[in-house]
Every structure is written in C-alpha cells, then in structure tokens.
Image (spheres, rainbow, N blue to C red):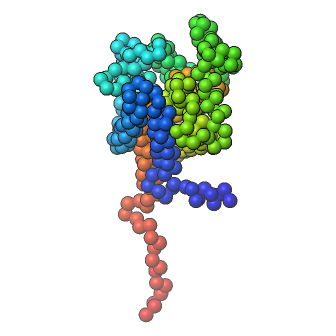
C-alpha cells in the first residue's frame, strides 16, 4: 500500500518537483490574503488607504517570484565559486546596518534604500548557507576528523552573531546558529562535539539573558503572560485570545477582532495568530502542513543530490530546509506562547520585502538543484554513446531460406 502511494505521488517522471511548487505558491498566496486581512485597519489609520500594506505586499510577492525566476537560471557552480565573496558582502551589510541602519522598535536592522528597506540579516542568512555548503564540499573529510576544520564555520558564525547582537536581532542569531550546526551534523561530524558546544552556547545564552533585565523579563513573561497582561505579557495574551476565538473553523476571513489595534504587529510577526482566529484550527494546521511539505521536499531534493555525488547541492538544500523550518517553527511557537517573543517573520507568509525575496531565492535554488539532479540522473541512465538502448536483433540460425 505504501509503495502504491509513493508511486502515485512521486515526481520522478516529471520535469520539476510539483509538491515543492505547490507548497511555496500556496504559502505565498495565503500570506498575501492574510496580510491584506490583518493590515486593513492599521493601514487605514496610518495612511488613509486600507490596502496600503496589501499593495506593497503584492509587489513584494511579484518581486520574489521575478527574482526567483532569475535565480533559478544561475547554475550551482556560480553559487559555489562566489560563496566566499558573498559571505564578505553579507558581513559588510551587517556592519553597514549598524552605521546607517534605520531604527524601528529599538532595533537597527534595516538599511534604507529610498522606498524600500533591506534587512541585512536576511541577506546574510542566505550568503552564510551558500558559504558553508561550499566549505563542506571542499573540506568534508577534515570536518569529520579534526576540530580545526569543524570550528572554522562556527568561528565565522560567531562573528556574524556578534554583529547581529549589536543590532540587536537575537532571533536571527538562533536561526543561523542552528542552521550552521545542523549542516555540520548532517555532514557526518561526531555528535559529541555538538553536545559539548551546546553546553557552552547554552551557558553563554543564559548569561546574555540575565545581563539585561528586559531580556530576562521577556523570557519569563511567556511562561505566565496573564501575570502582567497589560505590560510585558500584552502581545502574547492578545495572540492567545486570537487563537482561542478561532476555535475549529475560525470566525471567517476578514472577521478578526484582534487585528483591530489589539494585537501589535498583526500583519508581520503575529500574522499566524490572525490566521488562526479567522481560519481556525483547521486553517492553522493546514499552513503548518504546507511548511512541513516544503521542508520535507527540500530535504528530499538534498538527499537525492547527495546520492548523485553533488555535495554542494546537497548541503545547500539542507541549509535552506533548516532555515525555513526553524524560522517557521519559532514564529509559530512564539505566536502560540510556546517560546519567548522574537522578532522573526514567517517565511513566505509574513509582510516584509526582504524576507519574501530571500525566501523566493531559496526556493528557486531548490528548484535549480532539483533540475541539475534530474539531469544528472538522466545522463547516468542513458546508454553509452555509440550504443543503442534497443535489444539486439535476433541473428538467424543456419540457412533460413
């Protein structure tokens, strides 16, 4: 039965991965609808146009698709060769945002470029994945055997993490660190190294948390947000109210009450709470399943690339899957009160041009890996040049005349 289902839903004989396309486009379109629904009141209050954020988000969606169509045409060798240069560019952007960045809600994360703002951490996230994938291809045996080769990507990540903490953007630090460690783990590095590093990093995280009162307050408030629901627990309590009002099937599209100036950042970091209120448990679970499908297909493409002896492509897919999966998990967990509040967007769904475009490039890179793996498989299955794949003709036995 399982084999029959696998044959029915396989994309082996198709020219591209249809499940990946379905999940990515569905998330982008659902995101556009939910951003429109969640932002009408705040947009009307700020600009007088209730569809201001919806129009901008629609432009970002089209830009993400357009940039993705360009990125899918870039061969993998281009990304592999440009990896170190892209990493340097990402570091320069993180330094630049500290110098000329625009400060919003106490964080300096955006570089103003006229009508748009570029979030440096989103760009650096993509470039870090490309660099680590290329590094693992070049030094895979050394990474598995020696501490020096194993620690070099983590040293680069420490530098990026330091720059991100200065913004501050702790959510990006968690996602990127988890991504790099996950890529190293999937490369075959010994597990005990990760356990040792997790103890060290965990101790450092605790020290950072208790160093500033507001950080400790933010971390502890999620455990019981109702204890101070009008101060530190306000955002989370409003999100939980939205989840509670949604019940099984939701209040209906556009009928959210929490978006009416109760829930801050309703169309950005907490759009999933509005989605749960309007579409209910079934709508929320449906979106989670779409993310699970996208991440699963990314890992599946990476595994096929690894079996086809394309290590750079494989680790690139693993890194993209880890980033999208981790960021979606953290955003949804924050909205539902499972984790402390972090300023992380929901990939492909939340409002934000930088996040959408970078996510679009990541999905395009998955399609490129899938195309090159399929081409490699067809080339391996083709008969050697000069030989025919047809069975040889039967030779006559004796005189048939």
User: Which residue of the protein is positioned furthest toward the left in this rendering?
Assistant: 114
Position in image of residue 276 (x %, y %)? 60, 36
Can the viewer see residue 258? yes
Residue occupying the point 42% across, 29% down: 44
User: Closest to the observer: 294 or 160?
Assistant: 294
Q: Position of residue 16 (x, y in %)?
A: 45, 52
Q: Nearer the viewer, residue 167 or 47?
A: 47
Seen in the picture, residue 178 relative to 163 is either above or below; the reply is below
- Residue 83, by quadrant, is top left
Give the quadrant of residue 255. top right
Which quadrant would the N terminus be assigned to in this image? Answer: bottom right
Q: Position of residue 97 (x, y in %)?
A: 38, 16
Which quadrant does the C terminus fall into?
Answer: bottom left
Residue 385 in the image, given as x and y percentages of width and height: 38, 60
Look at 34% across and 20% down and name the residue there.
Answer: 112
Q: Which quadrant would residue 72 be assigned to in this image?
A: top left
Please indicate whether residue 31 sits to the left or right of residue 357 in the image.
Answer: right
Q: Is residue 3 above or below residue 220?
A: below
> In the shown orientation, is residue 32 left or right of residue 101?
right
Viewer can see residue 317: no
Relative to 246, say whether 189 is above or below.
above
Tell me which residue sits at (35%, 30%) in the image. Answer: 82
């Amino acid at each position: 039965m399982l084999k029959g289902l696998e044959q029915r839903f396989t994309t082996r004989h198709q020219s591209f991965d249809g499940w990946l396309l379905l999940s990515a486009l569905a998330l982008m379109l659902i995101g556009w609808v939910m951003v429109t629904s969640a932002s009408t009141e705040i947009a009307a209050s700020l600009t007088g146009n209730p569809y201001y954020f919806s129009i901008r988000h629609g432009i970002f969606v089209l830009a993400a698709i357009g940039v993705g169509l360009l990125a899918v045409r870039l061969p993998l060798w281009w990304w592999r060769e440009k990896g170190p240069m892209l990493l340097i560019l990402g570091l320069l952007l993180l330094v630049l945002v500290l110098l000329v960045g625009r400060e919003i809600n106490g964080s300096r994360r955006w570089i103003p470029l006229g009508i748009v703002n570029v979030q440096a951490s989103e760009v650096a996230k993509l470039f870090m994945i490309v660099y680590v994938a290329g590094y693992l291809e070049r030094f895979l045996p050394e990474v598995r055997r020696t501490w020096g080769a194993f620690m070099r990507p983590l040293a680069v990540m420490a530098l990026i993490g330091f720059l991100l903490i200065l913004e501050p953007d702790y959510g990006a630090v968690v996602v990127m660190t988890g991504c790099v460690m996950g890529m190293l783990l999937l490369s075959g590095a010994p597990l005990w190294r990760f356990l040792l590093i997790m103890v060290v990093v965990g101790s450092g995280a605790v020290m950072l948390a208790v160093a500033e009162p507001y950080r400790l307050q933010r971390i502890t408030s999620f455990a019981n947000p109702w204890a101070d629901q009008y101060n530190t627990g306000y955002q989370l309590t409003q999100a939980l109210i939205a989840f509670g009002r949604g019940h099984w099937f939701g209040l209906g599209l556009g009928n959210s009450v929490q978006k009416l100036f109760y829930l801050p950042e309703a169309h950005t970091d907490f759009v999933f709470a509005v989605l749960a209120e309007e579409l209910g448990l079934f709508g929320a679970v449906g979106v989670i399943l779409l993310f699970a499908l996208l991440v699963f297909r990314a890992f599946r493409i990476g595994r096929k690339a690894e079996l086809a002896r394309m290590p750079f492509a494989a680790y690139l897919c693993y890194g993209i899957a880890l980033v999208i999966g981790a960021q979606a998990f953290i955003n949804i967990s924050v909205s539902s009160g499972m984790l402390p509040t972090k300023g992380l967007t929901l990939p492909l769904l939340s409002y934000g041009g930088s996040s959408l475009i970078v996510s679009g490039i990541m999905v395009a890179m998955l399609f490129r890996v899938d195309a090159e793996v399929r081409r490699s498989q067809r080339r391996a299955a083709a008969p050697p040049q000069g030989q025919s794949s047809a069975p040889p003709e039967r030779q006559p036995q004796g005189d048939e005349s």
